[in-house]
Image: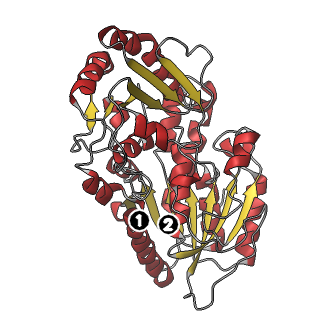
Amino acid sequence: MELPSKNYLPSRQASGTAVKGIATPMTPKGEEHKKKLLYLAVCDPDLQVTGATVRMGAFVTHLGRFYDVTLINMAGSGHRVEPEIESRFYDRDNQLGVTRRVRIKFSQAGYFLISPTLYRETDRLLKSGSFDFLLADYGLAAVYGKLFASRYRIPLIYSSHNVEYRMYLDLSKYDLRRRLLVPYVYWAERAACRAAELVVAISEHDRMEYAKWISLDRIEVIPQGFDPESCNPFYETPPRSPAVVLFIGSFRSEPNRQAARQIVDKILPQVIQARSDTRFQLIGADPPEDLKGSNLECTGFVDDLSPYLQRANLVIAPMPFAHGMATKIVLAMAFGKTVLTTPEGAGAIPRKYRQLVVAPLGAFPSTIVRLLALRPSVDAGQFGALCEEFAWKNLIARLHRRMEACFVGAVTQPARSLATP
């Protein structure tokens, strides 16, 4: 999912100088001692271009309130990002607030299998530094988490964004290579869960999936979130005409490509017939060239989503299938937007919010026309409730409490021993 730049992350005073490689730590005088966290990610939290990297960036930044964070990550976002985009996003001012950093060059083999370079650099960090926690974030970061938790007997937190092997099964309908990797991903995910002191799930549904492998008391649900300081409904109400219907999503994602095709082929023509002043706006990297037509704008990648969300009269997500929790929906509701989505797109997001409207794909055209006529373009009535449930500050504070409880257990109990394959 295409998402905003690092400007959506709250600014923090830099604690070191972010450079390629390891930054020199600078600890302010009088700062209390913090436990040391090694944060390992297979994507780049600087590149706020997908829901996964937005989540990583929020975790790194907010965990920095509690821990001395060393970040090691692979460049890219599950794919090689265009150099021009990457250069704009690279964290030269250390807005993530990490103390030290190692950044590994992206490779497809490294992302989908294992990166020897990422492995060696992580091993070097663990040998040279005394870390209190290892947090392995997302997907096949599980492999490194499992191996290093066993080798260094360090408390492991495995953070998932969805049940990864199930996502691979769904995507294998469109890409045979994914099916070939399912056994490997299944092993990695299960092994990391069993090795971890704590597993972070994104929804209660995912928590129950992981409970097939480990006990429920080792799983904490941390949903997708937002920062209320920058994502909120407190701005000037946009005009009602022309009515702007907004879709957000990276077109490297198969569900987003299918959703866009639904918009162009089936939804847009019927809506325009009923309300000719409606303009559909599709935002996301790498849009297919044939996504063209009257009353349709494909912007491609944008650095900052806020002006587009503020101008929109309605946000839609006609997803044929989805995994985890859709960042685009949580973010749009934070901006006060009504969001129309499918049951699959809504996923684990609670249906208690009036801004979330769920309908089958066939009902989208008539529902869009009705919502544009009846719903306000900005609805701030449930913003407080949204903050309580999805504000990053609250979510990461809860994660911190769980991590501290795990640390106490880890230092008083013998570490679990796992044989390295």
Residue visible at 57% across and 28% down?
299
Relative image position of residue 255 (x, y in whole percent): 48, 28
Q: Residue furthest bottom?
A: 30
Check disc 1 and report its element: helix, strand or loop: helix
Q: How is the image coloured?
A: secondary structure
Please state if 370 lies on the left or on the right of 329 as rendered. left
For badge 2, the amino acid type reads His
Structural crowding at the residue carrying mark 1, measured as other residues with C-alpha within 10 Å and reported as few (<14), some (14–19) or many (≥20): many
Quadrant including the C terminus: bottom right
Please state if 199 lies on the left or on the right of 145 as rendered. left
For marks 1 and 2 on the same chain, the one whose residue lies earlier in the sequence? 2
Q: Pointer 2: what residue?
A: 62
Residue visible at 53% across and 50% down?
54
Residue visible at 32% across and 57% down?
387
User: Can residue 113 be seen here?
Assistant: no
- 178 to 408, vertically: above or below: above
Check disc 2 and report its element: helix, strand or loop: helix
Structural crowding at the residue carrying mark 2, measured as other residues with C-alpha within 10 Å and reported as few (<14), some (14–19) or many (≥20): many
User: Can residue 60 be seen here?
Assistant: yes
Q: Determine the CA span between mark 1 and mark 2.
A: 7 Å
Relative image position of residue 92 (x, y in whole percent): 71, 60
Please state if 250 lies on the left or on the right of 271 as rendered. right
Q: Do the CB atoms of the residues marked 1 and 2 lie less than 8 Å apart? A: yes
Please state if 75 lies on the left or on the right of 96 as rendered. right
**Picture disc at residue 393:** 1
Asked which quadrant contains residue 49, the reply is: top right
Relative image position of residue 238 (x, y in whole percent): 36, 36
**Picture disc at residue 375:** none
Pick whichever, 289 or 279, lies toward us: 279
Relative image position of residue 277 (x, y in whole percent): 37, 16
